[in-house]
Image (cartoon, rainbow, N blue to C red):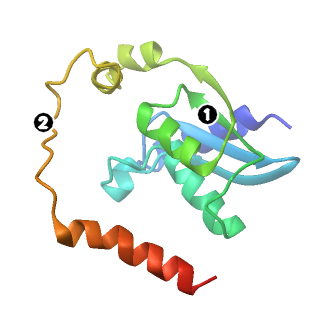
Amino acid sequence: MDYMKMAAEKTIEGMNAKIGGPFGATIVKGDEIIAVVSNTMMRDTDPSAHAEMVAVREACKKLGTMNLEGCTVYATCEPCPMCVSVMIWAGIKEVYYCNTSEDADKFGFSDMHLRKYLKGIDDSVINMVKVPQRDDCDYLFEHFDKLQEENK
């Protein structure tokens, strides 16, 4: 099966329906197709609705887990840092992509500012401020840990 072609075809559908831009993804596990999506940023007015993010969300719902180990992603374009992060969080170890971030940049879809920030080259894109220690915030971890122990 041509999983990349499936992603590309779904992307054309999404662009024609004006739900997203030129990005799509397919997630498979073994021979089972779990999700085939385009990005839905325009429809959802959601800057996180990249194709890989949408695919991971759908796959998690379909499989009833946040653990997508054993799944493979086929993306029409090199995933951005946000999408790479969510795939790592989900346990995905293998991603195939076609177009590069440089290709996307030529058409106005640039994630170079994110890549530069993450490499420590440019910290001007966001001002991250660490506030002093707070008991209410510390309690959140303690409370979660307590709940986890109670559920064992």
Image: 4 above or below 106: below
* Amino acid marked by disc 1: Ala
Could you tell whether 13 is left or right of 111 in the image?
A: right
Q: Which mark's residue is nearer the viewer, 1 or 2?
A: 2
Q: Residue at x 27, y 66 (%)?
A: 138
List x then y, in percent, for residue 43: 37, 55
Find numbered disc 1 in the image and state the secondary structure of the residue it sits on.
strand
Q: Residue at x 31, y 27 (%)?
A: 114
Q: Circle 2 sits on which residue?
A: 127
Image: 51 above or below 56: above
Q: Nearer the viewer, residue 133 or 12?
A: 133
- Which label sits on residue 75? 1
Could you tell whether 99 is left or right of 112 in the image?
A: right
Q: Residue at x 64, y 82 (%)?
A: 152
Distance from disc 1 to disc 2, alpha carbons, whole Å, reads 31 Å
Disc 1 residue crowd, few under 14, some 14–19, many 20+, Cα 10 Å: many
Residue 143 visible? The answer is yes
- Which label sits on residue 88? none
Q: Nearer the viewer, residue 142 or 15?
A: 142
Of the numbered discs 1 and 2, the one sitting upstream in the chain is 1
List x then y, in percent, for residue 132: 11, 53
Label 1 close to label 2 by CB (< 8 Å): no
Quadrant of image for the N terminus: top right
Q: Residue at x 31, y 22 (%)?
A: 108
Could you tell whether 96 is left or right of 118 in the image?
A: right
Find numbered disc 2 in the image and state the secondary structure of the residue it sits on.
loop
List x then y, in percent, for residue 86: 51, 46
List x then y, in percent, for residue 67: 66, 57
Q: Nearer the viewer, residue 114 or 23?
A: 114
